[in-house]
Image: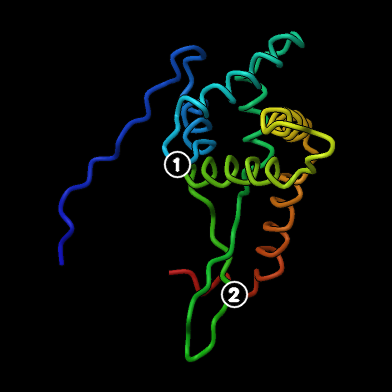
Amino acid sequence: MPRGNYKKQTIRPDSIYKSPEVTKLVNYVMLDGKKSVALKIVHEVFARFVADKKDPVQILHQAVTNVAPNFEVKPRRLGGASYLVPVEVRRTRKLFLALNWIIDAAQTRSNKEFKTFANKLHVELSEAAQNTGNAVNKKIQTEKLADANKAFAHLKW
């Protein structure tokens, strides 16, 4: 059945930082449609970077670059068996995975050390920009899994 023409929606840049990556981060932080709360959290995190005399958009970009995987595995079924086939990750999927992994890593941080989600996100973005932290470990695990399954690369289609 034909699906028709699909026009991809463009993401408007953030009003303060003029970056579509910031808008994506706000959308991924948002829970239950409460965008104003998510905006407040992200802008609080970015205000801390500005207070530390760092460019927050540059830190976000560096964190996304360090966390985004180049390869991931997708299961392919062939002759009754499932194989994990390594595939290259598209640019839009890289951004999605990187931001989700950063947010998940921030959410799993201990509440004893960091009281608010803004504190957790600030630390996780800082660590990801320096190529350390839980989100970067997730990338390393994903790429190791893809590397271990290189033998099934010929099953791509």
Residue shown at 51% from the left, 28% from the top: 21
Residue shown at 68% from the left, 43% from the top: 107
Quadrant of residue 73 within the rendered picture = bottom right
Q: Is residue 44 above or below residue 27?
A: above
Q: Which residue is mark 1?
A: 32
What secondary structure is marked by label 2? helix
Residue 47 placed where, x, y %?
65, 13
Q: Amino acid at mark 2?
A: Phe
Number of other residues with Cα within 10 Å of mark 2, as a class: few under 14, some 14 to 19, many 20 or more: some
Residue shown at 69% from the left, 65% from the top: 145
Q: Which residue is at the front of the view, 58 or 90?
A: 58
Residue shown at 29% from the left, 40% from the top: 8
Figure quadrant of the N terminus: bottom left
Sequence-wise, the earlier of marks 2 and 1 is: 1
Residue 36 placed where, x, y %?
46, 24
Q: Amino acid at mark 1?
A: Asp
What secondary structure is marked by label 1? loop
Name the front one of labels 2 and 1: 1
Q: Which residue is mark 2?
A: 152
Q: Could you tell whether 141 is left or right of 40 in the image?
A: right
